[in-house]
Image (spheres, grey):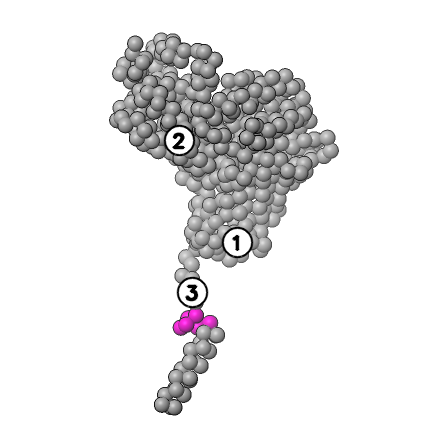
């Protein structure tokens, strides 16, 4: 007996020694071996395959910039917090034009190179395990206005009439001024700290902190982030629910206050149609610039000098349709623009217009236009995303409303932004929801109106009350 106990003691000593030495015999389970590979250099969008990147999920951006308006020079220091979705040997961020001075991953210097038009390829000091949260710091600088404005002269960093600058662009925007995963599929929080000379004001997304600091706590698609630097006059207030409102007016745009002051009224109307306002803040950036579009930059749309009340309605409808609920692929842009455009009709209906009469008149005007009806509303092809969605899209949604009836349509307008709040969705998701809510087989209707290239058959062209 005594010898047996001695033997057990010897065995116990051996086992304990093995555990203390890190032997796997009795220690904690070891992580599986890593098989690191490069993250993809594109996110998979069918129209813009090089946009965005794979291998990680961006969680948040902390962007710090110093900008000198007279010279146009920008210095940036951005930290990207992300979670690896695979074992990573390297990964990409998107950054256009600006010179990179250094990159750190989790505090350790990383190798980097530039490839293609906007790929910043980063190789960390050691591979990153799948599921790990990591932080990438990029220091960079240059004149962002000198970067070619891909996708049109108005997509990129722009100088403003007062000597300042502003940033708008769709589908490309953020990569002109900070390193980013430039795809709407990968939404993340956003914080900006901007330093500018005395006398200049910085306006951006979300809630205002100390001067030059803005924080958007809700996930935001990168093209919806913005910065505007100018000699703004700024109005501040709150909505009835306490949501802060900050609106900035560039010199020469002060007359736009008559429109901006109606924002609480507009948001109240849209909330009644679409459900509670989904954003952390509200307001607008009213430029004195003759650009060809206004943009639904999250919480605080950016307006061209020609913007009117319907524009205010349109851009703020995007806070539900496009900003809170974001598309995954640019082929589904109708999820953004068709609904924001139809919101203008809903406002007109509030003002007493008969939408059925307006619809019938539009059909008579366009009936003989093969070009008008040839515009697809989904899967339209690269370069055609922003064509039919603003006009044919309105008619399609009004026809859908009459096809399924007001109770189902009203429910659809509320349930969609509630179900996909601060997330991504696809056109098939919308068709499935419309079918479920209406209890009708809508395949033929969607084929005719949204995928079709000719005038719909009368049954789909004049559904419901439109037949009378």
* Residue at the extreme bottom of the image, as rendered: 2
Q: Position of residue 330 (x, y in %)?
A: 42, 31
| Residue indicated by mark 2 | 416
Mark 2, Cα crowd under 10 Å, few <14 / some 14-19 / many 20+, is many
* Dominant SS type (magenta): loop
- State which tag comes first along the sequence, 2 or 3: 3
162 is higher (above) or lower (below) than 35: above
Q: Nearer the viewer, mark 2 or mark 3?
A: 2
Circles 3 and 1: CB atoms closer than 8 Å: no
Q: Farthest residue toward the front?
A: 240
Q: Which of the two discs, 2 and 1, sits closer to the camera? A: 2
Answer whether labels 2 and 1 touch (C-beta < 8 Å): no
Residue 174 visible to the viewer: yes
Which residue is at the front of the view, 267 or 210?
Answer: 267
Q: Position of residue 33 (x, y in %)?
A: 41, 61
Query: Dot 1: what SS?
Result: loop
Q: Which residue is mark 3?
A: 30
Q: Quadrant of residue 336?
A: top left
Looking at the image, residue 231 sits to the left or right of residue 261; the answer is: right
The residue indicated by pointer 1 is: 124
Helix, strand or loop at mark 2: helix
Which of the two labelled residues, at mark 2 and mark 1, occupies the earlier sequence position? 1
Q: Is residue 54 left or right of residue 289?
A: left
Structural distance between the alpha carbons of marks 3 and 1: 23 Å
Q: Is residue 34 left or right of residue 248?
A: left
| Residue pictured at 41% horizontal, 72% vertical | 26
Quadrant of residue 50 within the rendered picture: top left
Which residues make up the magenta segment? 22-27
Please tell me whether residue 465 is drawn above or below residue 333 in the rendered image.
Answer: above
């Amino acid at each position: 007996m005594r010898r047996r106990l001695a033997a057990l003691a010897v065995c116990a000593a051996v086992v304990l020694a093995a555990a203390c030495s890190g032997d796997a015999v009795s220690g904690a389970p070891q992580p599986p071996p890593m098989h690191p590979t490069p993250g993809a250099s594109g996110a998979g969008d069918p129209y813009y395959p090089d946009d965005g990147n794979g291998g990680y999920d961006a969680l948040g951006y902390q962007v710090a910039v110093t900008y000198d308006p007279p010279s146009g020079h920008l210095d940036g220091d951005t930290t990207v917090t992300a979670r690896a979705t695979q074992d990573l040997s390297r990964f990409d961020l998107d950054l256009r034009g600006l010179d990179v001075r250094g990159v750190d991953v989790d505090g350790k210097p990383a190798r980097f190179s530039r490839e293609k038009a906007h790929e910043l390829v980063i190789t960390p000091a050691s591979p990153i395990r799948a599921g790990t949260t990591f932080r990438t710091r990029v220091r960079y600088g240059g004149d962002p206005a000198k970067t070619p404005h891909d996708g049109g002269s108005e997509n990129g960093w722009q100088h403003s009439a007062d000597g300042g600058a502003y940033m708008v662009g769709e589908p490309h925007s953020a990569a002109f001024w900070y390193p980013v995963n430039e795809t709407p599929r990968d939404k993340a929080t956003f914080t900006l700290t901007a330093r500018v000379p005395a006398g200049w004001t910085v306006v951006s997304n979300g809630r205002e902190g100390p001067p030059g600091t803005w924080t958007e706590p809700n996930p935001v698609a990168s093209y919806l982030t913005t910065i505007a630097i100018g000699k703004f006059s700024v109005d501040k207030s709150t909505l009835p629910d306490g949501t802060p409102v900050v609106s900035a007016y560039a010199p020469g745009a002060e007359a736009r206050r008559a429109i901006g002051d109606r924002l609480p009224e507009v948001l109240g109307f849209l909330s009644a149609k679409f459900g509670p306002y989904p954003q952390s803040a509200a307001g607008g950036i009213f430029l004195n610039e003759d650009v060809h579009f206004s943009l639904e930059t999250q919480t605080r749309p950016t307006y061209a000098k020609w913007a009117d009340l319907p524009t205010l309605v349109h851009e703020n409808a995007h806070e539900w349709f496009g900003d809170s609920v974001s598309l995954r692929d640019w082929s589904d842009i109708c999820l953004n623009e068709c609904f924001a455009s139809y919101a203008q009709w809903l406002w007109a209906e509030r003002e007493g217009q008969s939408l059925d009469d307006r619809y019938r008149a539009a059909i008579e005007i366009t009936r003989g236009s093969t070009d008008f009806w040839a515009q697809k509303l989904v899967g339209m092809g690269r370069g055609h995303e922003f064509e039919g969605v603003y006009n044919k899209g309105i008619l399609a949604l009004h026809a859908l409303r009459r096809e399924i009836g007001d109770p189902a349509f009203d429910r659809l307008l509320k349930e969609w932004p509630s179900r996909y709040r601060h997330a991504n969705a696809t056109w098939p998701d919308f068709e499935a929801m419309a079918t479920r809510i209406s209890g009708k087989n809508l395949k033929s209707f969607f084929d005719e109106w949204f995928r079709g290239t000719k005038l719909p058959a009368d049954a789909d062209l004049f559904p419901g009350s439109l037949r009378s």
